[in-house]
Image (tube, rainbow, N blue to C red):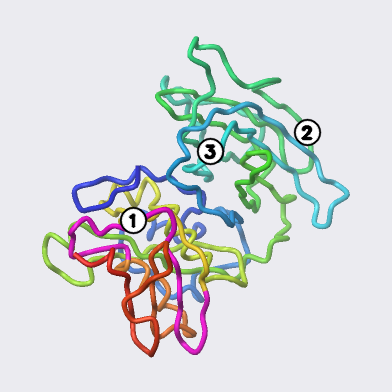
Amino acid sequence: MRSRGPLGRSTVLVAVMMLMTALTAATASAATPAPAATRATNLCQTAVDRTDATVGPTAGQTTVQGLRVGQHEDATPRYDRVVVDLASPLRNYQVRYVPQVIADGSGEPVNLRGSAFLYVRLDAIAHDDNGHGTITGSTDQVVNWGSLREARLVGDFEGVVTFGIGLRASTDFVVSTLTNPNRLVIDVAMPGQHPWGCNSGAVKVYFFDPARFTANVEPYTTPVWRRVETPAVAGGALYAMFHGPTDTETNSGLQFWNSSAWGFSNLSITNGIARVRLTFGCDSGGSTFSIAGEIFPTLKQFSSVQWVKIYDPAGNTGVPNGPTDSIPDCLNP
């Protein structure tokens, strides 16, 4: 569960990783990176998350039901696809390049076909109450396509399901979580091609930093980089914020402090004022810090936003009109 306060600990995993190899140093620490214009290139070798919905608090752990692959040679652009079928909407996940896929539980290296490898980690299970596997069909899909060579289930251990994807070469990829039916979709480009125009969409997302809070050093947040789909980068930044910190960021102490909100809606930016409504809940828990401390800087990084008005799920905020920031009463201490 996402943490609500400084004593909590976020377990949110996210598909949108830190920007490229050029951002590796920024991934390892919370140091402020250089401006995005000097960092981003026309590559998607860390995930561009195309998900446009936030999973509500009622969504529990899902069950993996299938592993499928597809070849889209006739599409423009050409790409190969890996699909993980799910029993219910997926909340937490991670997709990233690794030098070697390691099996959860055993810790043994997994030998996949290909020369570049994606590691896929889901908060899910792939077995029933009797210990029988729930994936219908093969758990190891071997092909010899333009990009994809293999997709294999490599772990189902303590509420975490992992897959390894072997590719012909390191290439661009994008990730989506879809519903009706529920599934995680990973599209990989042909080697040497960059079809998804990832030369933009680098944004900062601000997370609660307990070390700064304890030391009473403002601001109590630390920014990290995400890449989101353009042109709606403000909404993409908020979606990335609600997905929470990565494992590396969590290990460095960062948390997503959600103040009992599990999503947002009705984002608009007009005349320098950004308006956004929290969904599924709103409660500061009596704390002097709330989700507003993360939303304000995440939205104000954009030149079109000077003030931010946050509304509760019922559509109320303290100062609905005028050029000033505003929060609802549920975010007051």
**Residue 91: % across, % down:** 49, 43
Q: Kindly identify the amino acid type of the residue bearing the numbered disc 2.
A: Asn
Label 2 to label 3: alpha-carbon separation? 19 Å
Marked residue nearer the N-terminal end (2 or 3): 3
Q: In the rendered image, which quarter is residue 147 located in? A: top right
**As drawn, 146 above or below 154:** below
Residue hosting label 2: 144
Q: Looking at this view, name the residue that lies furthest to the left.
A: 215
Give the number of the mark in front: 1 or 2.
Answer: 1
Label 1 to label 2: alpha-carbon separation? 44 Å
Q: Looking at this view, name the residue that lies furthest to the top.
A: 130
**As drawn, 163 above or below 79:** above
Marked residue nearer the N-terminal end (1 or 2): 2
Q: Residues within 10 Å of mark 2 (few under 14, many from 20)?
A: few
Q: Say which of 135 and 25 sits in front.
A: 135
Q: Kindly identify the amino acid type of the residue bearing the numbered disc 1.
A: Asn
Stretch of the chain drawn in magenta = 268-291
Q: Residue at x 62, y 65 (%)?
A: 198
Give the number of the mark in front: 2 or 3.
Answer: 3
Q: Secondary structure at mark 1?
A: loop
**Residue 207: % across, % down:** 33, 61
Residue hosting label 1: 258
**Residue 88: % across, % down:** 57, 35
Disc marking residue 119: 3
Marked residue nearer the N-terminal end (3 or 1): 3
Image quarter (top left, top right, bottom left or bottom right) of the C terminus: bottom left
